[in-house]
Amino acid sequence: MLRPLLYGVALLALAGAAYAWFVPRTVDKEIPNVSTEATQTAQFAGGCFWCTEADFEKLDGVIEVISGYAGGTAETATYEQTSNKNTDHREVVQVKYDTNKLTFKDLADYHLRHVDPTDNEGQFVDRGYVYSPAIFYETLAEEQAAQIAVEELKALNKFEDPINIAIEETKPFYPAEEYHQDYYLKNPVRYKYYRNGSGRTDFLENTWSH
């Protein structure tokens, strides 16, 4: 009796895994209620925006993160356009944050520790300009904060290759398609498989675990 029972359990487990893989979850996130006077937005490019969004949403003081496209000159951007290199936008995230808890410099520091800042030709398994890392600024103070963050990172001597991350003025932001938003929550199995397989997880753990 035990073997048929185990076989049945195994089939149920496989069915559950298949369901998790193919069927996106619905997401009902609670966005913190913070007065508009205490909020700002900032944009960062870190390769695949699924990962960049997931990382920033773990940071205390971040209110909301939206995946999208920015940095280019075209008047609009879609996933199809950027994937086919028909526009000069990067995959980016727009981060809305509580200025009582975080500064722009805090965000820049955090971002630099969640990308490969030496690779300006893509990130991990994703290659091409659309996946190249960047910090975008709106003001001179933000530009200087980003530059200081990069210089402080250089001083840690964590990398054999030189730091090579773009610091650019903010340009219009275009939100990505809905199925890209909160991808790590809607499709947790696929997301984990992609992230681990891309090399991002191992790189960050090896770089910052010691």
Image (cartoon, rainbow, N blue to C red):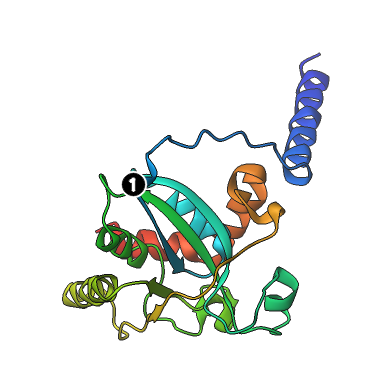
Relative horizontal placement of residue 92, taking residue 177 as reference (left or right):
left
Residue drawn at point x = 20 percent, y = 76 percent: 157
Q: Position of residue 6 (x, y in %)?
A: 75, 23
Secondary element at image label 1: helix
Categorize mark 1 by other alpha carbons within 10 Å: few (<14), some (14-19), many (20+).
few
Q: Nearer the viewer, residue 80 or 187?
A: 80
Amino acid carrying label 1: it is Glu
Q: Is residue 6 above or below residue 143?
A: above
Q: Nearer the viewer, residue 98 or 11?
A: 98
Q: Is residue 7 above or below residue 179?
A: above
Quadrant (top left/top right/bottom left/bottom right) for the C terminus:
bottom left
Q: Position of residue 87 (x, y in %)?
A: 66, 83
Residue drawn at point x = 34 percent, y = 67 percent: 112
Q: Give the residue pinned by disc 1.
A: 37
- Which corner quadrant of the image does residue 79 belong to? bottom right
Q: Is residue 167 above or below residue 191?
A: below
Q: Nearer the viewer, residue 109 or 161?
A: 109
Check the image and name the residue furthest to the front: 37
